Image (spheres, rainbow, N blue to C red):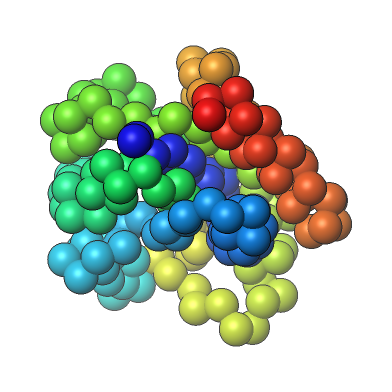
Amino acid sequence: MNGHFITFEGGEGAGKTTILHKMQNRLESLGYEVLATREPGGIEIAEQIRNVILDTNNTNMEDRTEALLYAAARRQHLVEKILPALKEGKIILCDRFIDSSLAYQGFARGLGIDEVFAINQFAIGGQMPNKTLFFDIKPEKGLERIASDMDREKNRLDREHLLFHEQVYKGYQILLERFPDRVQKINANQPVEQVEEEAFKCIHSYLENEG
């Protein structure tokens, strides 16, 4: 039995992490076996790479170095955690995956979506998500949420200027057009209960259609 690989994408402050854990609880209550994980990270080696990438002291990190580190963390995470879970028939809910690299490094950093896609194809060996939820919120609104959340640790990407986050948002719009069958937009600029319901309907519909 093959599992289902569902990813959660969006800019900073979109609320995708909160919704991911709500989806985990709801799916488990329906009897599904669910694995929640995140990128970069999810396993020890990838979490170490995450610390390097997001460290606010690493302001000199070159753009291609950043893209390669994300891809390296992704490879280890995939082979050590995601692929075994898929073979076990689990539903994997992953906070970010390849689309983040395409939007952030490919488009916003100007490295090229196709170029970063090629790097990541080497890393993932063609293992794309089955379904991706993009939590759509304008960058300025997402950054306002981050600024008001005193419990959230601010990382290196949070501190990028607004123009960078606007470019990330544009990158995601391109991905929505490029992968219309896989990526579904969720309106993240509404009360969390409504975001949760919209996300659940999307996932539940996918699971019913795919078995």
Q: Is residue 208 left or right of residue 192?
A: left
* 113 w.r.t. 11: above or below: above
Instruction: Please name the residue shown 56% across and 77% down the image.
Output: 152
Residue 203 horizontal/vertical position (percent): 62, 38
Residue 103 horizontal/vertical position (percent): 44, 36
Q: Is residue 210 left or right of residue 142?
A: left
Instruction: Please name the residue shown 45% across and 47% down the image.
Output: 91
Which is nearer the eye, 80 or 160? Answer: 80
* 44 w.r.t. 106: above or below: below
* Image quadrant in which you'd find residue 181: top right
* 16 w.r.t. 111: above or below: below
Q: Residue furthest bottom?
A: 151
Residue 47 horizontal/vertical position (percent): 26, 68
Instruction: Please name the residue shown 70% across and 45% down the image.
Output: 200
Which is nearer the eye, 82 or 159? Answer: 82
Q: Is residue 47 visible?
A: yes
Residue 32 horizontal/vertical position (percent): 53, 52
